[in-house]
């Protein structure tokens, strides 16, 4: 089975073509209190480090001693994850699609579909946070984290290495300037 076939997995048929990217601009400032990962480490390590940073913010939600702390951490988690998804959809994926000719289909389209699912759960989590429903917030977060871990494994194991290979260091350097 090819790398792309493995990356597409069983969700390929469920993803509609031509999905529009989210609207927020790339390169927006880092969420407060959370520095961006260094771009010096290269494409794969940069995006992987951002995955780990987002995981760490979720751990802050779970370990917060009180509701106010959990809601604050949930807002930072929301900002960090949405920024990561925007970076991928607006910078990394288009560069990969241009390099491979996979416009409107292929692994990035599958990833965009999974991002849409993540954003829908984030919307529900924001509602839970606004209504101070911590148990529901963490239940939604647990569901989201399961989805994220499966998604990240595909990106870290296949998409990022493929992107690194097709873009090369010049492609990464041009891209990295937008993340600083
Ligand atoms: Fe992603
Ligand atoms: Fe990612």
Image: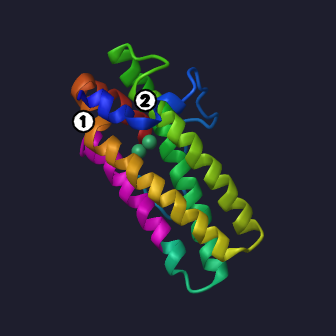
Quarter containing the C terminus: top left
> Which residue extends farthest top?
101
Residues at marks 1 and 2, CA–CA distance in whole angstroms: 13 Å
Residue 92 visible from this viewpoint: yes
- Image quarter for ligand 2 equals top left
Q: Is residue 163 left or right of residue 67?
A: left
Residue 44 is inside the magenta segment: yes
Residue 27 visible from this viewpoint: no
Instruction: Specify start and end residues of the magenta stretch as a single range.
Output: 37-59
The local crowd at label 1, few if under 14, some if 14 to 19, many if 20 or more residues have their Cα within 10 Å, is some
Residue 149 in picture, x, y percent from top left? 39, 55
Q: Which residue is mark 1?
A: 161
On the image, which quarter does residue 18 sit in?
Answer: top right
The circle drawn on residue 45 is: none
Residue contact at pointers 1 and 2, CB within 8 angstroms: no
Say which residue appears at 45% left-offset and 53% top-offset.
148
The local crowd at label 2, few if under 14, some if 14 to 19, many if 20 or more residues have their Cα within 10 Å, is many
75, above or below 62, in the image: above
The circle drawn on residue 108 is: 2
């Amino acid at each position: 089975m090819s790398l792309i076939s493995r990356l597409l997995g069983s969700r390929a048929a469920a993803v509609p073509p031509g999905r529009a990217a989210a609207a927020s601009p790339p390169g927006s400032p880092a969420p407060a209190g959370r520095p961006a990962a260094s771009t010096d480490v290269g494409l794969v390590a940069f995006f992987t480090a951002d995955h780990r940073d987002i995981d760490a913010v979720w751990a802050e939600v779970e370990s917060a001693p009180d509701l106010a702390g959990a809601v604050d951490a949930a807002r930072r988690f929301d900002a960090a994850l949405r920024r990561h998804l925007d970076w991928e959809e607006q910078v990394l994926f288009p560069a990969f699609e241009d390099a491979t000719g996979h416009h409107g289909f292929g692994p990035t389209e599958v990833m965009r579909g999974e991002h849409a699912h993540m954003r829908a759960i984030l919307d529900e989590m924001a509602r839970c946070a606004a209504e101070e429903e911590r148990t529901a917030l963490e239940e939604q977060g647990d569901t989201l984290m399961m989805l994220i871990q499966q998604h990240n494994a595909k990106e870290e194991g296949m998409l990022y290495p493929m992107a690194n290979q097709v873009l090369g260091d010049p492609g990464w350097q041009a891209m990295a300037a937008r993340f600083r």
